[in-house]
């Protein structure tokens, strides 16, 4: 049961858009797979190598520390709203976060509506004026999970236009302290 949810985008939050380190290391993937298997007992070679390399080499370490601070301070759980959820089971995303000892925080992902479904929602009275499908996916998730008492969407897209005080837009295309502080203020400190 999730009482506090952090709807997490990845690109522009954990992975700065300018970071392309993975391409410098792609020839080292066999040794990285071995290192990760030795450490976690997980065969990461079953995943797309560019995703694994991006997680390991491109995800910003300071942003990951700020994410952990949000989660530890508030008791929130991660619901992935990023495009990274497309065609990946939740176990894959958990294993990516396991590299940073945060797998237990990742509990679910939002629905991924196709164009037609999203169009129907946008035309409904309830979502009139919301043009960003990700917002609708998040709002539908919250509606389907009434146990969620507090939530925030952390993204580099300007979701605050539609989600108002429940959205934090990264200020520098990666998660920094000021963004994390806003998330903590919205979610509240854990008891």
Image: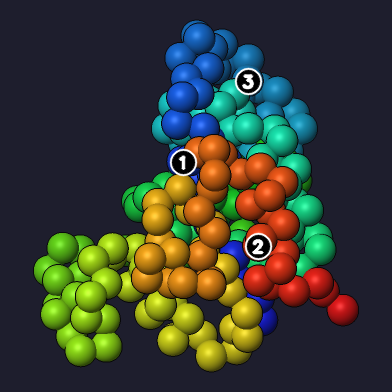
Sequence order check, earlier mark of 2 and 3: 3
Q: Is residue 176 left or right of residue 17?
A: right
The answer, for residue 101, to whether it is visible in the render is yes
Query: Residue 7: percent from the left, percent from the top?
Result: 53, 63
**Residue that badge 1 annotates:** 11
- Quarter that holds the C terminus: bottom right
Q: Nearer the viewer, mark 2 or mark 1?
A: 2
Query: Residue 85: percent from the left, percent from the top?
Result: 42, 53
Label for residue 32? 3
Q: CA distance from mark 2 to mark 1?
A: 17 Å
Q: Is residue 7 left or right of residue 97?
A: left
**Residue that badge 2 annotates:** 183
Above or below residue 1? Residue 75 is above
Q: Quadrant of residue 30?
A: top right
The answer, for residue 92, to whether it is visible in the render is no
Label for residue 131? none
- Given residues 143 and 152, the one toward you in this image is 152
The colour scheme used here is rainbow
Q: CA distance from mark 2 to mark 3?
A: 33 Å
- Neighbour tally class for label 2: few under 14, some 14-19, many 20 plus, Cα within 10 Å: many
Q: CA distance from mark 3 to mark 1?
A: 22 Å
Above or below residue 109? Residue 31 is above
Is disc 2 placed on a helix, strand or loop? helix
């Amino acid at each position: 049961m999730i009482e506090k949810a952090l709807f997490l985008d990845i690109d522009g939050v954990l992975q700065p858009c300018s970071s392309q380190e993975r391409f410098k290391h792609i020839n080292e993937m066999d040794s990285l797979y071995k290192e990760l298997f030795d450490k976690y007992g997980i065969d990461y070679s079953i995943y797309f190598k560019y995703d694994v390399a991006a997680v390991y080499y491109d995800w910003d370490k300071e942003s990951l520390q700020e994410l952990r601070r949000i989660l530890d301070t508030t008791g929130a759980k991660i619901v992935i709203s990023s495009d990274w959820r497309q065609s990946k089971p939740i176990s894959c995303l958990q294993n990516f976060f396991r590299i940073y000892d945060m797998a237990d925080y990742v509990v679910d992902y939002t629905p991924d509506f196709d164009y037609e479904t999203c169009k129907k929602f946008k035309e409904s009275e309830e979502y009139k004026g919301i043009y960003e499908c990700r917002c609708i996916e998040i709002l539908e998730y919250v509606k389907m999970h009434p146990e969620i008492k507090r939530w925030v969407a952390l993204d580099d897209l300007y979701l605050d236009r539609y989600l108002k005080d429940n959205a934090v837009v990264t200020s520098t295309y990666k998660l920094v302290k000021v963004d994390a502080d806003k998330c903590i203020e919205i979610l509240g400190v854990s008891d």
